[in-house]
């Protein structure tokens, strides 16, 4: 027996040897430089079948066109609150969520509507939410994607960014106790990645080796604040080093790359190796909400992204160049999406507003909270 | 397996019932619920091998394993968030704050996520958030908090705080079985107080959330209180009895949703109300109780409602300072006498 093995065999206790620190950031799917004048397309190296690619195309169009319809409703003053767009960054949400199994969980933020559709939520639910209607999943109690559907593996966000990451960690902790091999995908923006909850959630998941995949969307602005005033790291994926987990950088406007990188992360996480951090490089072409005039954006920037790096344009170019679909086929898909949107929007508009006293119900299980402004004593004295 | 888990000392399963201190009673309650329901699990800092800072979870890890007794990083957002997520998945987490002072680090997730989930979309979080609260133990500004009033104005959180071993066990079991998030505050001064040792039933029982207890019946003055101050009130009542004053002591046990009926019934009987609590006066729970009495039992009152609470400073450290901060027995006696003579 060699001397070193013998020593190890005799050693009962001592410091465990761990490999030296190494920044593990995979850039295989990161944005690629292309020659000037060469239009951007998508990753060709993919396991996706043609029909899956067309499904991805349908989700991309659905996301963009639903949002456009919501803007129309907003201009008709039918939307009760603000409207939040994911224009220009739809591919990140759609491509990543498409890599999940139906029993996996997502927790999106406001700019991940596409992932919500991929998980099976219908446009009618979103329309009803935006119009604060009784038939919406929250019955008029909360806005837009702020709801959940445990059956579909969708937990809606709250406005407090970062909070959903520790919540997703709890979903996965429970799943492990319940012997379910699901993974969880939590989305966050470059701004949300500055919160304590972001760190606490991923740190705990990393310690517990839970299958948590966090996608940080580098979309350049958190409301009006540019990313260089949000963090001193150049790539948000570098934050993975703080947790001892692998990091990936992906071109967030390449829907196939987003799918492939998430698929890798899902396989890694589901096999029990722990959490993953993915940074998606993308760009928010609209303001924080519809009212935002984007005065803080340098001139020409939005136009550049619109002209040269629109995720749907890129994917269309890819599908046509690779002869996966004809223009007619894509138009047919778009027409189908429009029919669905028309039908669902009509359904949502036909919903009544909630009955006022619904406000007093549901704080606790089977409870009704008596209105505080109608105290008994005043009723008695009448 | 980490070295911390390879410990020599293994704690025994607690007795079913029998003579128990409050800390034993809570431990019995959690243990029995974990045996009864495989979805119950414990999560917090140092709750595993160490058994919790006050040994409430002592021995659980030996018996139920580290999958159901989860030591976390120093990370209250992770503890609360994970309890919320697990609760949504149908588990029943019992999350520990090492000291209730640190609940502030989980405040956002408690008040914005746990409290509002059911209301917003029917998301069900049957979690218990528990921890040692209370002052009078010379622990300074960061280990002595009474946190109830931070949460009273948040719809969606139930709050309980026992003052006896029997109630401690019954309430922790009720909190674990409750379908909503429950904050369970344990006054650390009462944990091992010999005076609170009592014989607990062997059979399974719960103490219903939302119901106050008459700790002592009386006709002249009502002292409405909870937690460790119940003992101050009872001692004061004994003293006042010698003077011919018959004091009633209401132990709220549940702070939200508050048992208004019990408060009003007592005040309508005695016509004099003294509210006693440990947190600072301004913005404290006493203001809410006083308002309920003023609004709904005004005609029955023979004297103004009196609040006794700590002064409006942080909890202090040095014994003379902390004694000055806290309401003392003498303050209760004086207030009750004045009320009776009004």
Image (cartoon, rainbow, N blue to C red):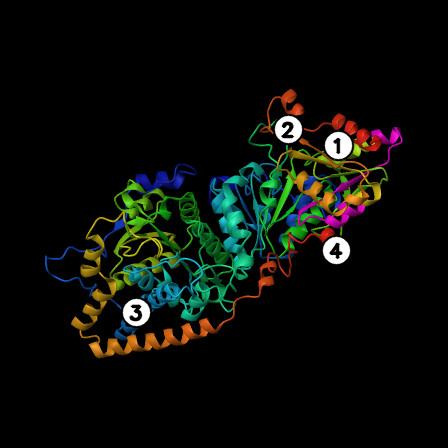
Residue bearing mark 3: A61
Badge number at residue A120? none
Is residue A319 rendered to the left or right of residue B337? left
- Alpha-carbon distance for marks 1 and 4? 41 Å
Residue bearing mark 2: B311
* Stretch of the chain drawn in magenta: B239-266
Q: Chain of mark 2?
A: B
The reply to the same-chain question for discs 2 and 3 is no
Q: What is the quadrant of the C terminus of chain B in the image?
A: top right
Q: Nearer the viewer, mark 2 or mark 1?
A: 2
The residue at 52%/40% (across/down) is B104
Count of numbered circles on the image? 4
The residue at 88%/29% (across/down) is B242
The reply to the same-chain question for discs 3 and 4 is yes
Q: Nearer the viewer, residue A202 or A289?
A: A289
Residue bearing mark 1: B232
Q: Secondary structure at mark 1?
A: helix
């Amino acid at each position: 027996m060699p001397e070193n093995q013998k020593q190890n065999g005799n050693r009962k206790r001592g410091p465990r040897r761990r490999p030296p620190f190494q920044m593990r950031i995979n850039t295989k799917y990161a944005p690629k430089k292309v020659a000037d004048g060469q239009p951007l397309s998508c990753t060709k190296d993919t396991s996706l079948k043609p029909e899956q690619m067309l499904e991805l195309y349908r989700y991309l169009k659905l996301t963009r066109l639903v949002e456009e319809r919501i803007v129309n409703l907003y201009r008709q003053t039918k939307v009760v609150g603000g409207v939040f767009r994911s224009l220009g960054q739809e591919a990140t949400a759609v491509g990543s969520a498409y890599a999940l199994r139906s029993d996996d969980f997502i927790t999106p933020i406001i700019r991940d509507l596409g992932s919500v559709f991929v998980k099976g939520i219908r446009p009618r639910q979103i329309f009803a939410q935006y119009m604060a209607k009784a038939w919406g999943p929250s019955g008029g109690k909360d806005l837009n994607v702020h709801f959940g559907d445990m059956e579909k593996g969708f937990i809606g966000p709250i406005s407090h960014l970062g909070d959903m990451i520790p919540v997703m960690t709890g979903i996965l902790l429970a799943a492990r106790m319940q012997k379910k091999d699901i993974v969880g995908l939590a989305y966050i923006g470059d701004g949300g990645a500055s919160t304590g909850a972001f760190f606490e959630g991923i740190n705990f998941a990393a310690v517990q080796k839970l299958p948590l995949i966090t996608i940080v969307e580098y979309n350049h602005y958190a409301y009006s604040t540019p990313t260089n005033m949000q963090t001193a790291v150049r790539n948000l994926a570098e934050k993975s080093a703080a947790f001892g987990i692998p990091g990936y950088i992906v071109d967030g406007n390449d829907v196939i790359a987003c799918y492939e990188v998430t698929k890798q992360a899902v396989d890694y996480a589901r096999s029990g190796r722990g959490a993953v951090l993915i940074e998606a490089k993308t760009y928010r072409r609209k303001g924080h909400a519809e009212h935002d005039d984007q005065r803080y954006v340098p001139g020409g920037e939005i136009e550049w992204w619109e002209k040269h790096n629109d995720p749907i344009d890129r994917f269309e170019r890819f599908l046509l160049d690779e002869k996966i679909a004809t223009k007619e086929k894509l138009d047919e898909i778009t027409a189908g999406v429009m029919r669905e949107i028309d039908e669902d929007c009509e359904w949502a508009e036909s919903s009544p507003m909630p009955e006022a006293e619904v406000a007093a119900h549901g704080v606790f299980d089977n409870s009704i909270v008596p209105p505080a402004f109608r105290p008994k004593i005043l009723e008695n004295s009448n | 397996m980490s070295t911390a888990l390879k410990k020599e000392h293994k704690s025994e399963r607690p007795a079913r019932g029998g003579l128990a201190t409050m800390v034993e009673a809570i431990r019995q309650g959690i243990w029995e619920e974990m045996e009864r329901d495989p979805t119950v699990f414990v999560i917090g800092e140092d709750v595993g091998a160490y058994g919790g800072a006050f040994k409430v979870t002592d021995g659980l890890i030996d018996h139920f394993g580290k999958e159901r007794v989860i030591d976390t990083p120093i990370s209250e957002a992770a503890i609360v968030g994970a309890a919320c997520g697990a609760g949504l998945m149908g588990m029943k987490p019992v999350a520990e704050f090492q000291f209730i002072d640190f609940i502030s680090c989980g405040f956002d997730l408690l008040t914005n996520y746990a409290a509002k989930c059911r209301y917003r979309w029917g998301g069900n979080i049957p979690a218990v958030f528990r921890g040692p609260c209370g002052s009078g133990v010379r622990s300074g500004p960061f280990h002595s908090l009474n946190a109830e009033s931070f949460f009273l104005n948040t719809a969606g959180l139930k709050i309980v705080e026992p003052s006896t071993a029997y109630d401690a066990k019954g309430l922790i079991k009720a909190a674990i079985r409750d379908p909503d998030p429950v904050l369970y505050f344990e006054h650390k001064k009462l944990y091992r107080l010999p005076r609170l040792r009592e014989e607990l039933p062997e059979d399974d029982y719960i103490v219903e959330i939302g119901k106050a207890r008459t700790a002592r019946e009386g006709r002249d003055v009502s002292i409405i209180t909870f937690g460790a101050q119940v003992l101050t009130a009872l001692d004061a009542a004994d003293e006042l009895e010698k003077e011919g004053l018959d004091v009633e002591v209401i132990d709220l046990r549940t702070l939200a949703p508050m048992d208004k009926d019990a408060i009003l019934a007592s005040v309508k009987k005695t016509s004099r109300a003294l509210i006693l609590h440990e947190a600072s006066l301004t913005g404290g729970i006493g203001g809410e109780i006083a308002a309920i009495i003023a609004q709904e039992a005004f005609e029955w009152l023979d004297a103004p409602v009196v609040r006794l609470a700590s002064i409006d400073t942080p909890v202090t450290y040095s014994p003379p300072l902390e004694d000055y901060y806290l309401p003392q027995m003498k303050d209760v006696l004086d207030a009750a006498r004045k009320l009776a003579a009004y």
